[in-house]
Image: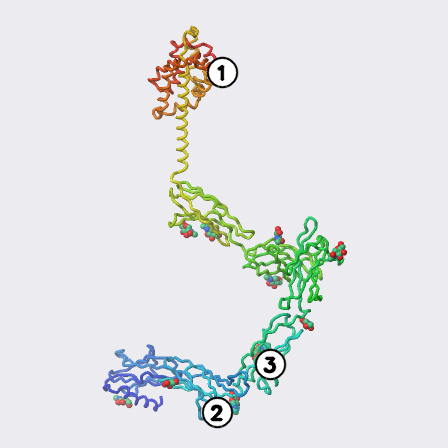
Amino acid sequence: MSLYRVLFVLTAIPSVCSGQNENSCNVGPKDQYILVGSDTDVVCQTSCVHGRIYWTLNNTSVDESLSTAFNSSHTVLSLRNFTHHSATLQCQSVASRQVLGGTTIRTYTKPGRISCILHHSNQLDESLPDLFTCKWEHRMNTPLAINYSVLGAYGSQLSQREICKSHITECKASSDPIKLLENITITIRAKTAAWEVDSDPQEFSPLHILKMIRPQLSVTTFSDHLSVEWKRASRSKECHCQVKYGELVNMTLKEGDGSLSIWNLESCRNYTFSVRCAFDGAPWSDWSEEKTVLTKMNESDVQLRLWRNVAEPEESGVRKVHAMWTEIPPTCGDTFTYTVKPYTRDGMEVNDTAALCRGSTCDLYVNRDAHTIHLTVFHNETLLSEYSVYIPAAGESLPGVTDMETSTLKGVILVSWKAPIQPVSGYMIDWSHGGNQYYWKESKYTNATLSDLLDKKPYNITVTPLFGNKTGHGTQALQICSGVGDPGNVTITQVEPNDKSALVSWNVKSEGACSGAVVNYTIFYGIQEGPQLNVTVDGTVQSLLLKDLNPDTNYVVYVEATALSGTTRSLERHVKTKRFDPGLITAVSISGSIIILLVLFLGLCCAIKWKNFKEKPVPNPGLSSAVLWPAASHHERVYPIQPFNPSESLCDRVYTEDTHTSTTLLTAGCDGNPASDQTDEYIDPDTFPAPDVQCEHPVKPVETQHLSSPDDSTALLPLENSPLSPYRSQASDEISASRSSKHCKRVSVKQPEKAAPVTVYVTLDMFEQGQGR
Ligand SMILES: *[C@@H]1O[C@H](CO)[C@@H](O)[C@H](O)[C@H]1NC(C)=O
Ligand SMILES: *[C@@H]1O[C@H](CO)[C@@H](O)[C@H](O)[C@H]1NC(C)=O
Ligand SMILES: *[C@@H]1O[C@H](CO)[C@@H](O)[C@H](O)[C@H]1NC(C)=O
Ligand SMILES: *[C@@H]1O[C@H](CO)[C@@H](O)[C@H](O)[C@H]1NC(C)=O
Ligand SMILES: *[C@@H]1O[C@H](CO)[C@@H](O)[C@H](O)[C@H]1NC(C)=O
Ligand SMILES: *[C@@H]1O[C@H](CO)[C@@H](O)[C@H](O)[C@H]1NC(C)=O
Ligand SMILES: *[C@@H]1O[C@H](CO)[C@@H](O)[C@H](O)[C@H]1NC(C)=O
Ligand SMILES: *[C@@H]1O[C@H](CO)[C@@H](O)[C@H](O)[C@H]1NC(C)=O
Ligand SMILES: *[C@@H]1O[C@H](CO)[C@@H](O)[C@H](O)[C@H]1NC(C)=O
Ligand SMILES: *[C@@H]1O[C@H](CO)[C@@H](O)[C@H](O)[C@H]1NC(C)=O
C-alpha cells in the first residue's frame, strides 16, 4: 500500500474515534461510496483488546494477507478492485471473537454507452438541426437521487460546457445549435449527495450523428407497374434509403431525389409504401408518411381457375356437373360477367335449360358423352378471357387414382392416393360438405391437406388426375368426418318406479354421421338436495333398474352419454317411488277380487237354491209311483255313487235327467261347478260365515212358502217330479245342524245311506242314467 494513502487513512482515524478514550475499538472510515473496481483501505483501532484480529466481509472472512498491522493499536485492511455492490466489513478479535467495529462500503458506476443525435424539431425544415439528444446507460444501485448533466467540449478545447441536465438517462437540448463542422466531446456527469462520477468522454462527429428530416413520398400507379418517388434533404450529399412495401428495398442515392419503379405486383391489391434515408454512418430518418395504393388489373395476370365436380350419372344418363371458379378480386371492380356453358366434343353448345348459377358456381347437366365446360369472362362487355375444363365421357378409358386414404388430424383432413400408371401433370382435389359449396385445390404430389373445414362434419372428397388439357376420372373417397362430435341427444324415454326400485330407459339420437359412438352411459340419480349416486353401464345398454331406493320418495334422474369425443346429458326426470310394492298390491287385489267373486258366487248359488225351494211345491207323494227297491241290487247300485266324483255333483245328475229346462241348467251350473266344490273344500267355512247364513235361511222358507206358490210355471214342473226335491226337503232338517255347502255335498253322498225312506221317490232309471255317464 502506498504510504501516502495509509497516512491519509490513519490521520482520518482520530476524527472517527474522537471523543473515545485510548482503549476503545472502532473501524473507519464509515459508510464509504467508491467507484466500482477501485481500491480502498479500512482501519481497525484495536486498543480495547490484545492479540490478533481478523476481518469479515459480508460475514465471510477476508484473506489475512490483505490485513496489515500498522502499529500495535491500528490494523489496516487494503481492498483492491472492489466490485461488490454493497459490503459490510467487520473487525473481530481472534481470541474473543468479539466484534470490535464495522463499516459499509457501497460502489457506484460510471455512465456508459453514450449515443447522441442531432435532429430537427420540424420534419419539414431541412435547415440546421435544432435538437441535440443524448442517451446513455447507467447502472444505479443507490437509493440516492441522481442528477445528470451532459457536458460538451468542442474540438480540442478543454473547457466543458453544460449542454443539458436531467434526472433520467436521456437528455434533450434545444435552441442551442451545434457547430456542424467541429467534433464535439461529450461527458456525462452523475451526481448524488454522496458521490459524483464522470463518464469516459466520447467524441462525436456532428455529421455522423445528424438525422435527416423524413423524406416526402409519392406513389403513382401505372397499368403495369408502380412508381415510387421521394424528396429528401441535402440533395447534394450521398445517402442511403429504404423503401418498404411488405418487402424492403435498399438503395443508395448519390445525389438528387429518390425514385423506384416496381413491377410484378399483384393485380388489384393494396400496397402501402414508406421510405426513410440516412447519411453514411448516421442514424436513419423517421419513416415517411405511409402511402397506400391499389394496383391496377393486369389482364394477363388475373389467372382465373375453373374446376368441376361430376356426379355419377342418373338412370337417364344425365350427369350433374358442379362448375366452380375463382372470381376476379372484387378490388378490381365489379364490372365482370362470367358465363359457363357445356360444349360437346364437337364444339356444339349444349342447350342446358336447367343450369343454375349462383356466385362463382353453376350446376349444369350433361349426358354421358365427353364434354368441355367453358368459362368466359367479360369486362365491360369485352371478352377478357376464356377457360375450359374437360369432362370425360362416362365410360371413357382414362386414368384415375386408386387406394385413396383419408384421415383426420386436429380439424384438417389428410388425403393420399396412389398415382395412376399413366403419367399425370398433377391432381385436383375437390371436397364438399353437403354438396352446396365445394372447395378445391391442386396438388403435385399424391397427397393433400384439406384445412378450413367445418367442425365435425362429413366431407365427400374427390381426386381427379390432370394431364395435358384433359382430366381423368375422379375417384371419391369414403365419406370422412372432419372431427368426431358429441354422442348426440340422450332422452329418458321411460321411468317405471316401484317402491324400492325404478326402471329407467333411454335412447340416444345421434346428430348426423359424425356423432361419436357412446362408450358408456352413466345414470345419475338422487333425492333433491341429497347425495347423488351414479351407475355406469356399457354403451350397448339402454335401460337400467335402479335399486335400493326409498319408497314414496322423489328422485331426480338423468343419463349422461360418454363418447371418446365428449359427453351429452339428458334432461332431468323427476320420479316418485311407490309407497308399496305394486306386486303386493296386485296380489292383494287379485285375492280380494277372488274373495269377492267367491262371496258373490256363493250368494248367487244360495239365492238360486232358495229360489228353487221357494218356487217348488213339495211333491205330492200321491202322484208318485211306488216301486220296490231291489234289495240285492241296492248296494251294487249305490256303490258306484259312493266314491263321489267331485267334478260331478248332484246338480249334474239332475241335469242329465231333465235336459229340457233352463232353470235346471242354472241350478246345475251352480251346484255342479267343480271349482265351487273345490273352493268349498279349501276355504275354512268359519272364515266365511256369510254363505251359511244365506244358505240356511233360504232353505227353510222353501218349506213354508212353497204352498203359497202352487201356480208355478210349467217349466218347473219336471223338477217337482224329480227325485231331487225330497232330498232337499229332508236335508232342510239337517241344515240347522250342518253347513249348507257341506250339506249339499253330503246330501249327494250320504243319501244312499239314508235311502230307506227316500226310495219311494227315486226311479231306477235315474241311477242307471247317472251311472252311465
Ligand atoms: C498508532 O498510529 C496512530 C496513527 O498514527 C496513532 O494515533 C497511535 O497513537 C499509534 N499507536 C501507538 C501505540 O503507537
Ligand atoms: C439535483 O438537482 C436539483 C435541482 O434540479 C437540486 O435541487 C439538487 O440539490 C441536486 N442534487 C444534487 C445531489 O446535486
Ligand atoms: C471526429 O470524430 C470522429 C469520430 O467520431 C473521428 O473519426 C474524427 O477523426 C474526428 N475528427 C476530428 C477533426 O477530430
Ligand atoms: C401483366 O403482367 C405480366 C407479368 O405478370 C407482364 O409481363 C405484362 O407486361 C403485364 N401487362 C400489363 C398490361 O400490365
Ligand atoms: C437493407 O439494409 C439493411 C440494413 O441496412 C439490411 O439489414 C437488409 O438486409 C438490407 N436488405 C436488402 C434486401 O439488402
Ligand atoms: C340449341 O339447340 C338448337 C338446336 O337444337 C341450336 O340451333 C341452338 O343453337 C342451340 N343453342 C342455343 C343457345 O339455343
Ligand atoms: C357423399 O357421398 C355419399 C356416399 O359416400 C353420397 O351418398 C352422398 O350423396 C354424397 N354427398 C354429396 C353432397 O355428394
Ligand atoms: C406429401 O408428399 C410429399 C412427397 O411425398 C411429402 O414431401 C409431403 O410431406 C407429403 N405431405 C403430407 C401432408 O403428407
Ligand atoms: C366411460 O368411458 C370413458 C371414455 O372411454 C372413460 O374415460 C370412463 O372411464 C368410462 N367410465 C367407466 C365408469 O368405465
Ligand atoms: C360416481 O359415484 C362414485 C361413488 O360411487 C364417485 O366416486 C364418482 O365421483 C361418481 N362419478 C361422478 C361422475 O359423479
Side of 93 relative to 384 (left or right): left
Q: Amino acid at mark 1?
A: His
Residue 539 position (above or below residue 56):
above
- Residue 68 location (% of width, % of height): 32, 85
Dot 3 falls on a residue whose secondary structure is strand
Question: In this rendering, which labeled residue sits more in front, label 2 or label 1?
Answer: 1
Q: Are marks 3 and 1 in contact (CB under 8 Å)?
A: no
Dot 2 falls on a residue whose secondary structure is strand
Q: Could you tell me which quadrant the N terminus lies in?
A: bottom left
Q: Mark 3 — residue?
A: 230
Determine if the C-beta at disc 2 is less than 8 A from ligand 3: no
Query: Does residue 30 appear anywhere in the picture?
Result: yes
Q: Mark 2 — residue?
A: 154
- Residue 447 location (% of width, % of height): 62, 60
Cα separation, mark 2 vs mark 1, equals 157 Å
Splitting the image into 4 quarters, where does residue 737 fall?
top left
Sooner in the amino-acid sequence: mark 2 or mark 3: 2
Determine if the C-beta at disc 3 is less than 8 A from ligand 5: no
Quadrant of the image where one finds ligand 1: bottom left
Sooner in the amino-acid sequence: mark 2 or mark 1: 2
- Residue 384 location (% of width, % of height): 70, 66
Q: Mark 1 — residue?
A: 660
Cα separation, mark 3 vs mark 1, equals 135 Å
